[in-house]
Image (spheres, helix red, strand yellow):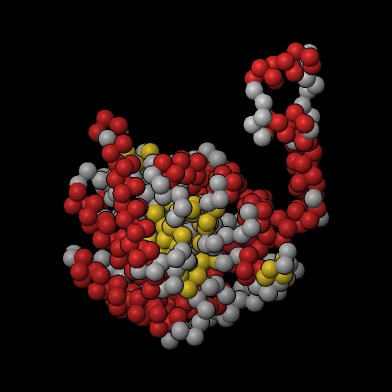
Amino acid sequence: MSKFPEINRIPYEGPQSKNPLAFRYYDADRVIMGKKMSEHLPFAMAWWHNLGAAGTDMFGRDTADKSFGAQPGTMEHAKAKVDAGFEFMEKLGIKYFCFHDVDLVPEADDIKETNRRLDEISDYILEMMQGTDIRCLWGTANMFSNPRFMNGAGSTNSVDVFAFAAAQVKKALDLTVKLGGRGYVFWGGREGYETLLNTDMKFEQENIAKLMHMAVDYGRSIGFTGDFYIEPKPKEPMKHQYDFDAATAIGFLKQYGLDKDFKMNIEANHATLAGHTFQHDLRVSAINGMLGSIDANQGDPLLGWDTDEFPFNVYDATLCMYEVLKSGGLTGGFNFDSKNRRPSYTVEDMFYAYILGMDTFALGLIKAAELIEDGRLDQFVEEKYASWKGELGQKIRNGETNLAELAAYADEMGKPELPGSGRQEYLETVLNSVLFK
Ligand code: XLS
Ligand code: CA
Ligand code: CA
């Protein structure tokens, strides 16, 4: 039985459309720079927000009804969520989903029973996948909600909690492989600290690396060929999280020999919490060959926490897609780790939110391709560094000179000319002229 009987498949109607249940920019088969939009933009539904989050915040309870006709906390409800999720994805033309273990089933007191429930629900999901091209984008284990993880999972002080976390990772990897997942995420929600007065930082970081190495070994042994991802976030829930931002996480991966198996899953709202732009963390990942996947959302600078809003900022989406196109595309996808605002509590709002997010990234893709085709930004950057093309620049780049030689060169020169103008305001005009032409 349909969970959304009043909603039809969402059509593409073009920018002039005023139909709230239609796409204005996301046209799955439209070809941009030689690839279909649907291939550039492997969108994913986040199981936890879309099928789970119902508006509860620090000050008030649920506003939305996500029971989907079943009693929450039961396996019947877990199955109703599967039904709702697949209908939702099919109506929007979304091909992927992302999940935590405990988004799929209610957690039992005993891990053996939780795992039995996970087997049952994943069989049911597999059945639903038949005859569709819907697959898992990435799976993960929730190692932050249960009180056992108050001091972390890989970084916990309790060896038993560490073993329990390992068991959850093992099961979540089994599920990811079973559901055809492209990736596996570690988000270090409680891998950090509240105070250094009670924390052995080195010991904790070494143990996180141990857990990740075990995950790689196990994943590869069961045929997982996808990427592992770290999803950086500087804080929240902990005061300080070890995977602070892309640069920190990449340094960690290199230090512990995990950089061949791991890439980054960059969430927009986490990058801005770290004091960066979204584009910054994408660029840092890309130049290190580690731009794997994206959690597509946005924060609110006036609130300053992890608000997980559906993305509507076309500047950010354009600059994101600019980085993605320049880096040759993602091995992962675009997961809407986003939730409706609490007063947007109806079924229509669930669809409007995904239409907004998908259209924003589609428009970002169109505009990023136009920026690249326009060529003025690339040309400016090329010219900005032109002095390095000469003999001296080449000698420095090739490691064929030294300080003494450069000092002699400087003596002869007297003083350098000022470097060329950065032309930021002009380049921002170029960006606007492409966005609003
Ligand atoms: C929380 C994170 C989380 C990860 C997956 O802030 O965004 O949802 O994406 O555990
Ligand atoms: Ca988040
Ligand atoms: Ca996320």
In the rendered image, residue 275, in percent from the top left (x then y), is placed at 52, 38
Above or below residue 353? Residue 188 is: above
Q: Nearer the viewer, residue 87 or 55?
A: 87
Residue at the (73%, 58%) spot, across then down: 369
Residue at the (53%, 43%) spot, across then down: 272
In the rendered image, residue 315, in percent from the top left (x then y), is placed at 67, 50
Looking at the image, can residue 24 be seen?
no
Quarter of the image containing the C terminus? bottom right
56 left or right, relative to 293: left
Above or below residue 159? Residue 386 is: above
In the rendered image, residue 44, in percent from the top left (x then y), is placed at 51, 66
Q: Nearer the viewer, residue 352 or 437?
A: 437
Looking at the image, can residue 400 be seen?
yes
In the rendered image, residue 13, in percent from the top left (x then y), is placed at 70, 74
Q: Nearer the viewer, residue 138 or 149?
A: 138
319 left or right, relative to 189: right
Above or below residue 10? Residue 360 is: above
Residue at the (79%, 44%) spot, across then down: 379
Q: Nearer the viewer, residue 314 or 214?
A: 214
Number of callouts in the render? 0
Residue at the (68%, 74%) spot, across then down: 29
